[in-house]
Image (cartoon, grey):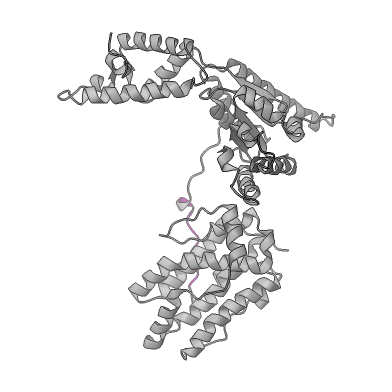
């Protein structure tokens, strides 16, 4: 079996093939019609190729190939796993593209051979899609030939003869396919210049990530727990290199705490830290909640959950309010199906996937104890305490600094009082940093209304927040 192509290689070859054919079309209107329609038809034909192979074995690679089918100037698709799998299952019959009739009409009028050239080009492109697994099966080649024959029969009907036999897919069966560069009647495309490639962002070092962690307001216990976890992983790696036994250890985590306490921020940093120390291959964070995993009917929850997991492989899957996956009132709730898919993937990808579940303390503990599989995999807990009044004030100051605002002395004193009172009177609806952001945004809005009435305000006036900007709408100024 040949080495499968990457989605970026597929996109490059597909784009080059469609661009080369587009340049062969002399008529501007016909060229525009082709450009606008070709991607949609090709994506449909890809579904047919995969159905011919084995409709039940759709993988995330098929989704990546599908999303690579776009040409310059057209929208980039972002299909999900379930959409592609459903499309493959529901593909019916090959229908010639509507622009093919226009190609044949042009050929009849001008004596050209655009329709037959497109037929060969279609064969090559469909073989490109068939090579999602590195080979072309006989059933895939049969589908490609059937598509080609359907187009050729229309050409024969119109009396459009070819100068040479049409390309057949049979010669590519069970062989790695690199078809696009061999497209008929097209010139070889130049290799893209390295200057055209997007520059890769430099990955942060472990020291930089730890410095960013330390810069977060509060969270002292969480910071200590993260550093202890890093030390544990480092020592395990050293023991492995020294040939010493290492006890089994789960790196999946439970984040307990109220909203706005920095759980998502820490999860994103931890994903990058795990990547920096070699635990994860990529270090991305994929954030979901129940709605991102659970569908409303049988069978679709597994696909939806699998889609989220596939995006997270190499990084961290962060499930906020994870307790919502368990419905104590219904044993048949689809959330249980999502949990089973998660547990299976945590085992299958245990070397390159970390799951972090987060939410309120009480409901999260009930969630973990609802399933023995969850209990065995989630045995490390990070507790995120509420920010106190002083920490909330530090967060407000950082928001001002980041966004180019400055508190007057009187405004600073008033805000300190408000945040101390907010912390002292907190209840189950307390939003921590989220409440601070809401206060900041309201202050900016009031300041804008005030400054807009000034005639040619100065830079200082544009930046300054005064006590009246901070006063709550339902509380008149003292």
Q: Going by the picture, which residue comes out furthest to the front?
A: 329
- Quarter of the picture holding the N terminus: bottom right
Q: In this image, 137 relative to 208: left or right?
A: right
The answer to whether 410 is drawn above or below residue 202 in the figure is above
Is residue 99 visible in the rendered image? The answer is yes
Q: In this image, 110 relative to 50: left or right?
A: left
Q: Going by the picture, which residue comes out furthest to the bottom?
A: 159
The number of numbered discs placed on residues in the rendered structure image is: 0
The answer to whether 170 is drawn above or below residue 337 in the figure is below
Q: In this image, 118 relative to 328: left or right?
A: left
**Residue stretch in magenta:** 187-195
Give how far across and how far down residue 23 sits, in percent: 41, 72
Q: Quadrant of residue 470?
A: top left
Give how far across and how far down residue 421 sits, in percent: 43, 10
Give how far across and how far down residue 170 sits, in percent: 67, 77
By secondary structure, the bulk of the magenta-drawn segment is best described as loop
Can residue 47 be found in the magenta stretch?
A: no
Q: Going by the picture, which residue comes out furthest to the left?
A: 455
Residue at 65% from the left image edge and 55% from the top image edge: 59
The answer to whether 165 is drawn above or below residue 12 in the figure is below
Give how far across and how far down residue 246 sits, in percent: 82, 29
Q: Quadrant of residue 478?
A: top left
Residue at 50% from the left image edge and 24% from the top image edge: 260
Is residue 404 visible in the rendered image? The answer is no
Q: Which of these two is toward me, 183 or 87?
A: 87
Q: In this image, 102 relative to 336: left or right?
A: left
Q: Which of these two is toward me, 331 or 106?
A: 331
């Amino acid at each position: 079996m040949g080495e499968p192509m990457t989605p970026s290689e597929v996109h490059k070859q597909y784009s080059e093939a469609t661009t080369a054919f587009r340049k062969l079309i002399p008529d501007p209107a016909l060229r525009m019609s082709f450009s606008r329609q070709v991607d949609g038809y090709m994506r449909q034909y890809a579904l047919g190729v995969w159905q011919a192979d084995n409709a039940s074995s759709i993988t995330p690679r098929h989704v990546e190939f599908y999303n690579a089918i776009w040409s310059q100037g057209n929208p980039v698709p972002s299909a999900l796993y379930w959409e592609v799998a459903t499309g493959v299952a529901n593909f019916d019959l090959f229908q010639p593209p509507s622009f093919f009739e226009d190609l044949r009409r042009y050929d009849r009028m001008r004596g050209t051979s655009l329709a037959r050239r497109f037929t060969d080009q279609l064969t090559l492109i469909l073989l490109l899609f068939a090579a999602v697994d590195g080979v072309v099966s006989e059933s895939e080649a049969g589908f490609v030939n059937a598509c080609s024959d359907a187009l050729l029969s229309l050409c024969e009907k119109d009396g459009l003869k070819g100068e040479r036999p049409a390309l057949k897919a049979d010669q590519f069966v069970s062989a790695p396919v690199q078809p696009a560069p061999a497209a008929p009647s097209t010139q070889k495309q130049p290799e893209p210049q390295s200057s055209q490639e997007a520059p890769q962002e430099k990955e942060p070092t472990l020291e930089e990530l730890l410095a960013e962690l330390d810069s977060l307001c509060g969270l002292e216990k969480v910071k200590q727990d993260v550093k202890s976890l890093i030390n544990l992983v480092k020592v395990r790696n050293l023991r492995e290199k020294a040939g010493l036994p290492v006890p089994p250890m789960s790196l999946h985590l439970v984040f307990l705490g109220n909203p706005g306490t920095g759980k998502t921020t820490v999860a994103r940093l931890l994903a990058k830290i795990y990547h920096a120390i070699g635990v994860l291959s990529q270090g991305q964070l994929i954030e979901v909640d129940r709605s991102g995993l659970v569908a409303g009917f049988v069978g679709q929850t597994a696909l939806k959950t699998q889609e989220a997991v596939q995006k997270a492989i190499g990084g961290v899957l962060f499930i906020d309010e994870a307790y919502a996956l368990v419905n104590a009132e219904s044993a048949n709730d689809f959330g249980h199906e999502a949990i089973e898919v998660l547990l299976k993937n945590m085992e299958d990808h245990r070397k390159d996937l970390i799951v972090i579940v987060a939410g309120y303390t009480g409901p999260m503990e009930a969630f973990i104890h609802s399933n023995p599989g969850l209990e065995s995999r989630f045995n490390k807990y990070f507790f995120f305490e509420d920010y106190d009044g002083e920490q909330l004030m530090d967060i407000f100051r950082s928001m001002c600094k980041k966004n180019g605002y400055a508190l007057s002395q009187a405004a600073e004193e008033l805000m300190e009082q408000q945040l101390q009172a907010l912390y002292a009177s907190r209840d189950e609806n307390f939003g921590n940093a989220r409440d601070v952001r809401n206060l900041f945004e309201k202050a900016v809005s009031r300041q804008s209304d005030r400054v807009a009435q000034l005639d040619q305000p100065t830079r200082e006036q544009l930046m300054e927040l005064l006590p009246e900007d901070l006063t709550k709408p339902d509380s008149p100024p003292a």
